[in-house]
Amino acid sequence: MSFDVNAIREQFPILSRQIDGQPLVYLDNAATTQKPQCVIDAIVNYYSTCNSNVHRGAHRLADEATRLYEGARDTVAEFLQANAREEVIWTGGTTEAINIVANGLGQMLKPGDEVLVTEMEHHANLITWQQACKRAGASLKIAPINDAGELMLDAYEQLLNSNTKFVAFPQVSNALGTLNPIKSLIAKAKAVNALVLVDGAQGIAHGPVNVQELGCDFYAFSAHKLFGPTGVGVLWGRQELLASWPVWQVGGEMISSVSYQDAQWNVLPYRLEAGTPHIAGVIATGEAIRWFMALDMAALAAHEAALLASATEQAEAFEGLRIVGSAQQKMGVLSFVMDAGHPADIGFLLDRQGIAIRTGHHCAEPLMGRLGVPGTARASFSIYNTLAEVDALFAGLSKVKMMLA
Ligand SMILES: *Cc1c(COP(=O)(O)O)cnc(C)c1O
């Protein structure tokens, strides 16, 4: 199987859109990816053939919907190489998944305990822990990065000690593209018996993940960054941990029995899934993952590496442009600033040429402060982007530079 980018592009209806008569060049994949037709069809099919609530119905539609819904959970369990389907909890996204863990485990933190995160966190993996520490009187430690945007491994290791109860870091930085050596970060945290959460929101779309082999305790990702719908995410966690802490939300579905004065909780995974879920979204997430798993992963990785290499080479040769984040190991993201103007102006003038990027702090405001920039312009690549689109970005930036001169 080889990688035919045009055959992939044809499956994404939005990619043939025009913006003011120009072809759309979509380079904002770190914010969200586009959806292939099969994912769009999965949503439409659910609503047009078996819309009903899951788990509780005594009729055909409910049976069919439940089978599709729980089938998607099996798909995720297989995708992550989980031990059991009970370890896969549906959430509203990465943000909610991390909140569930920080709220659940956060209740077990005590004064004197430490939580360790990194300088490159997305707000979702920073504020959650920051607030959990404040509530518990625990302290939040921040592992530093170097100017290239790489985690400083010695400093990380020195911050780990017997008080470290929890460690959390991103697989890939959404703002810089840094790929962290997560397997060794996990092993070092495990050596002091800390629990480890990997924020996989930005890593998941770049290749397969094996949570058993990684050795982490929790892994979180959002469907919408993996060719699936918004409003759905996954929290994978070790069963004994997910079953151990006080429940997060209470209500329907998550109970085994209820009286006016008391309630007993359901088993995993339902224990952590209160209320009617995003059924269509979950079913479409299963479809997105099956679609993704069928791709040739080695060819996909080579294609993505070629896109980033071309973008980096052109950026380095571009006068008046500075790359922000030049880690040795990087994926999918080119963040930069330009002498010619503010990132917001760059984004606006690229948009006028049909080129979609993102500008600002990328939900990593402290990281921008650490790197001494107010924000960056960020082009982020996915499997359906082409080398011609990378060229279009730099042709667009040349025009931007002239317009701002
Ligand atoms: C997008 C992202 C998040 C948050 O994901 P949501 O889908 O907004 O909940 C967290 N961490 C990283 C690294 C991200 O890229």
Image (spheres, grey):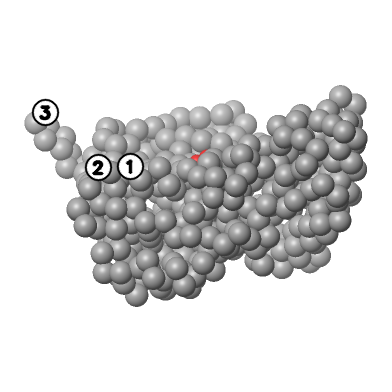
Between residues 108 and 71, which one lies in front from this camera angle? Answer: 108
Give me the residue at 32% from left, 37% from top.
274
Which is more foreground, mark 3 or mark 2?
2
For the view shown, which residue lies furthest in the left direction?
Answer: 261
Horizontal and vertical percent for residue 94? 48, 45
Give me the residue at 35% from left, 45% from top.
130
- Give yes or no for contact between labels 3 and 1 (Cβ–Cβ under 8 Å): no
Three-letter residue code for mark 2:
Arg
Label at residue 135? 2
Give me the residue at 87% from left, 33% from top.
405
**Circle 3 — which element?**
loop
- Give the class, few, some or many, for how many residues have Cα within 10 Å of label 1's Cα (few <14, many ≥20): some
The correct choice, above or below, for 348 with respect to 390 in the image is: above
Horizontal and vertical percent for residue 217? 37, 62
Horizontal and vertical percent for residue 61? 47, 33
Residue that numbered label 1 is attached to: 131
- Give yes or no for contact between labels 3 and 2 (Cβ–Cβ under 8 Å): no
- Give yes or no for contact between labels 1 and 2 (Cβ–Cβ under 8 Å): yes
Three-letter residue code for mark 3:
Tyr
Q: Ligand 1: does it lie within 8 Å of the C-beta at label 2?
A: no
Residue that numbered label 3 is attached to: 260
- Give the class, few, some or many, for how many residues have Cα within 10 Å of label 2's Cα (few <14, many ≥20): some
- Image quadrant holding the N terminus, namely bottom right
The part of the image, by quadrant, that contains residue 146 is: bottom right
Mark earlier in primary sequence (3, 2): 2
Between residues 324 and 77, which one lies in front from this camera angle? Answer: 324
**Circle 2 — which element?**
helix
**Circle 1 — which element?**
helix
